[in-house]
Image: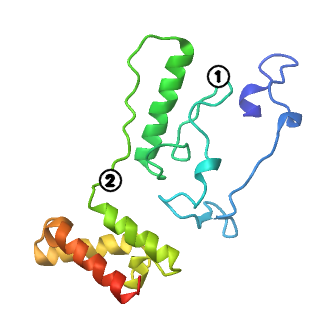
Amino acid sequence: MKAALNGHAPGDLVIRDALVHSFHLDADLDYAAGTPPTNYSRLLIHPPSSWAMRPDAATQIPNLVLAGDYVRTNTDMASMEGACEAARRAVNAIVQRAGVQATPATIWPLTEPTYFERWNQLDAQLYAAGKAHVFELLGIRHAGVAAKLLRRFEDVSGIAALDDLVDKVRATEIIKSVQTRLGL
């Protein structure tokens, strides 16, 4: 930023080192093998309790808005969808601050299918009991592996969607069975 902003006019110092408040290099980035670094960060899911630390798109600085998957959004995932929502929030802040009469960019609420509720309850029970996530109990260490297994099953079986295999009633039976076996 200094190279881009400073020195365009004699004595023009827009950014000085004394203005640096702090900086942080992500501890999950490993430069031991050179560049690009190895990234040990979890992708998609933000770290637990990070919601309070993530910034809103509209900052307290009048001419600064933020957009990216790290911004606090309803989506709450490090994804293009989260970044897009953050961009919509940033645009709305710019339009509002500029006093422009325009229809704001739509911000959709996060909605989950109602049949996820039982799975969320099971997840909360497992967590409260100090048990592993249901994927780990099934030997699935990563969500990507679960998706890959489901795609393979779909290819072999011809079933086009998971809800064709596990409908709401069957899901309830599976959850009750897991709860009983784990003593929850």
Q: Horizontal and vertical percent for residue 98?
A: 55, 13
Identified at 84% across, 34% down, the residue is 19
Give the quarter of the figure containing the C terminus. bottom left
**How is the rendered protein coloured?**
rainbow
Query: Which secondary structure, mark 1?
Result: loop
Residue underneath mark 1: 63
Q: Residue furthest left?
A: 158
Identified at 24% across, 72% down, the residue is 172
Q: Label 1 crowding class (10 Å Cα cut-off): few <14, some 14-19, many 20+?
A: few
Left or right: residue 19 compared with residue 139: right
Above/below status of 85 relative to 14: below
Q: Horizontal and vertical percent for residue 51?
A: 58, 50
Above/below status of 37 relative to 56: below
**Separation of disc 1 and disc 2 at Cα?**
35 Å
Identified at 30% across, 76% down, the residue is 175
Left or right: residue 123 compared with residue 67: left
Q: Horizontal and vertical percent for residue 90?
A: 52, 30
Foreground of the two, 172 or 98: 172
Residue underneath mark 2: 112
Query: Which secondary structure, mark 2?
Result: loop
